Amino acid sequence: MGIDSRLPLMQDADLEGKVVLVRVDHNVIKKGAIKDPYRIDATLGTLYSIAERGGRIILMSHVGRPRDKKTGSIKTGGETSVRAIAEYLGRKLCTSFVVPDLEVDPQRGIVAIDDSVKRLVEDLRKRKIGGIYLPNTRWFEGEQDEAGARDLMSAQLAGLADVFVNDAFGSWQPHASTHHVTTRLPSFAGPLMQKEIENLGRVLEPERPFVAVIAGSKYDTKIGPLGEIYKKVDRLILGGVIYNAYLCAKYGIRVQGVDQADVDLAGRLVEIDRTEGKIVELPHVVESDSLSERLEGGYRTLSISDMSEGLECGYILDAAPESFEDEHVARALTFARTIFVNAVMGFTPMFREGSEALYKAVSDNDEAMKLLGGGDTLQEFKTLCPGRYMSALDDQRFYFFTGGGTVLKAIEQGSAYGLPTVAALIDNGGTPPLH
């Protein structure tokens, strides 16, 4: 799948002497520190290109979920601050990114961008500072708000810059900083977004045989994309609660911690697969007595062949590593020519062997195009198989998506171009602002 000719591209924009507002997905902060810099590093090429072409950079990203869903109040503070990201970029690019201190309302968060930022923009134009990194976009009242506050935020963001570049494929929701700002500035897709869309085409139009490995903690959150993936694959391997729900539905067993609603949903997949036969079952799983700790003698391997109706199991918290030595599983992964993985197989860090065995089995296939998506997937691959992860970064047969949830959403829709943020660039981008 190539890039749609309607999508305005950053390489076609005039950036000389322009202030460029860049939306990135640097949502990598855990407890105030960078967990994994991959999403930041993936945008470095974009930043180099803008600077080389004479542009001056203002960055913005969301971090975490600082808005309380029940009260609507926004909590600002170090745990969701972008300062660690700005400092990391400063070290990487040998320059400084200034993070403005904006007035914060205890309930509403940042209500407006004040004149202090405009003065920083003047310093940026005069090259007195290297760049600006705006505070966490979700600290702003208008980022996820409706109408009034949203329109104010998008207008004030547009007032800071000459051009908008969206390089945050992982942030597909139509928020002020990803969507509404495109109606106010000439807007373009960044190089990383273009790369994500191109590689998404390898999933939507794969070289066959095509194998997908999907896991998740809730079945209902994956049912839409899982149904579409099932239609596209030659073989499907399941893990996590999704697999547990499938086993309950197929074999009539009960697994502790699995909701009946998930089992009912999985029953539809079981019925479809009776005819299609695409699911490759992992024949051995790990049952645990405890969900909170790994107790010596408190866990054991179960065989799918021993499951029969009425069996009651404890918590099934991993796929046993010997599952990936099974003839049917090994054959599916060995002969695949496209492998898509959005999966952590075990309840890590307590149970990690299944995930480690999966990532090794996938990376052992030298011929397949291997596409991995989801922050948890990449983090566990890096943690469990660090050598293979580092090799994969420079391997043309691997691609790591920065936004796993966005990939699943695009798969569900059958295209990246229906995502609100991408559609907004096509509808509004590359044109004079409307306001």
Image (spheres, grey):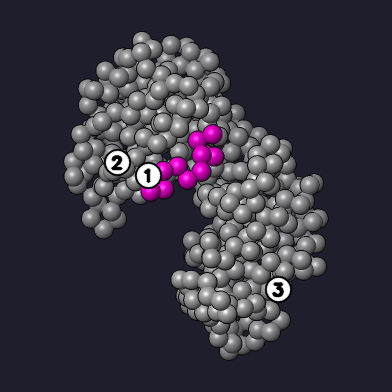
* 105 vs 239: above or below: above
Mark nearer the viewer, 1 or 3:
1
Read off the magenta span.
30-41
Residue bearing mark 1 = 32
Disc assigned to residue 283: 3
How far apart marks 1 and 3 lie (CA) works out to 41 Å
Q: Position of residue 128 (x, y in %)?
A: 36, 13
Say which quadrant the N terminus sits in: top right
- Judged left or right of residue 283, residue 93 is left
Q: Secondary structure at mark 1?
A: loop
Q: Secondary structure at mark 3?
A: loop
- Mark 1 Cα within 10 Å, few/some/many (few <14, many 20+)? some
Q: Position of residue 91 (x, y in %)?
A: 47, 27
Residue bearing mark 2 = 139
Q: Secondary structure at mark 2?
A: helix
Residue at (63%, 82%) from the top-left corner? 251
* 264 vs 429: above or below: below
- From this viewpoint, is residue 343 visible? yes
Q: Earlier in the sequence, mark 3 or mark 2?
A: 2
Foreground: 56 or 414? 56
Q: Position of residue 245 (x, y in %)?
A: 56, 73
Residue at (72%, 69%) from the top-left corner? 322
- Judged left or right of residue 10, residue 77 is left
Amino acid beneath label 3: Pro
Mark nearer the viewer, 2 or 1:
1
Residue sticking out furthest to the front: 296
Q: Earlier in the sequence, mark 1 or mark 3?
A: 1
Amino acid beneath label 1: Gly
Q: Earlier in the sequence, mark 2 or mark 1?
A: 1
Quadrant hosting residue 60: top left
